Image (tube, rainbow, N blue to C red):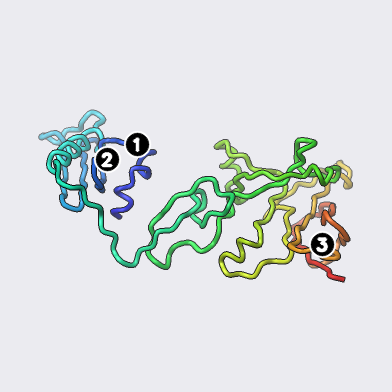
Amino acid sequence: ITDILSDDDARAPSFGHNSVLKLSRPAAVKTGTTTDWRDNWTVGYTPDLVAGVWVGNADNSPMLGISGVTGAGPIWHDFMQMATGDAPATAFHQPPGMARTDICIDSGLLPTEWCQRRRSELFIAGTQPTEFDTVYQPVEFDACRGGPVSAASDPQCIKQRVVRVYPPELRDWARANGIEQPDVAVAAQPDAIAQAVGRPASALTLVSPDPNSEFQWVDGLSADVQQIRLAARPSGQPAKVSFLVDGEEVALATSAPYETWWTLQPGAHSISAQSVDA
């Protein structure tokens, strides 16, 4: 709790950086305001001093939009600064059984090489994340044609860039908030990530389509243009790659790039790929 209440970055979205809640020494603080504006509080502490401030009218009448940070906050700040004076600043003591871990902010999981927003967080030992972030991922696109990879893409034109890829149920929210959600294949994370958490590296990874993807069949449109790309990325150099839909082989790629195009069919389907060494 002290770690949370002393984090100026955590309260910045509500109060801004360097508000009256920040002292010139480590301090944890919490404000409170009643919904009818009759009371507001600021209660906080350093390792050496605790103080609480209440602000309100003597007749219990509502105040005019005064909150904890604008009413009690400045009084608490000035008192704490004066009371601690020139005394040496002391840090909060971290209790035993805690662990500090770097996380990727968007997911709260361990950061990969692609994670662009990171921070250090405190956990009760044993509760820190062990899985790696899957929000920041490299996606493939056709750099020559300026769009998603298609059957007409030159393999030499297929490039990668890192984007934030949210689960399907969050993608409308992400787009509404200006976070691009790719309509192109999401590249799987490399074997090094699996090895980093002690799992065996996969020999073959399906990189297209995106997990949990949904596609719409358009009546009246030719079937040969209503296809999705199936693509796999091997860690070695298999002789062949077999693509399966619902456990049945639909294509066999004999050389890189290991990909094929499959005509959409109604219903839910499971798509997988497996290497064929001979």
Q: Which residue is mark 3?
A: 243
Front position in the image: 224 or 78: 78
Residue 17 disc label: 1
In the image, residue 116 lies at what x, y percent? Answer: 54, 45
Asked if the residue under mark 3 is in contact with the one under mark 2, i.e. CB atoms within 8 Å, the reply is no
Q: Which residue is mark 2?
A: 22
Amino acid at the residue labelled 3: Phe
User: How far apart are labels 2 and 3 at the CA level?
Assistant: 58 Å
What residue is drawn where x is 75% and y is 58%? Answer: 233
Asked if the residue under mark 3 is in contact with the one under mark 1, i.e. CB atoms within 8 Å, the reply is no
SS for dot 2: loop
SS for dot 3: strand
Amino acid at the residue labelled 2: Lys
Amino acid at the residue labelled 1: His
| Viewer can see residue 58 | yes
Depth check, mark 1 against mark 3: the one in front is: 1
In the image, residue 66 lies at what x, y percent? Answer: 24, 32
SS for dot 1: loop
User: How far apart are labels 2 and 1 at the CA level?
Assistant: 8 Å
Front position in the image: 139 or 212: 139
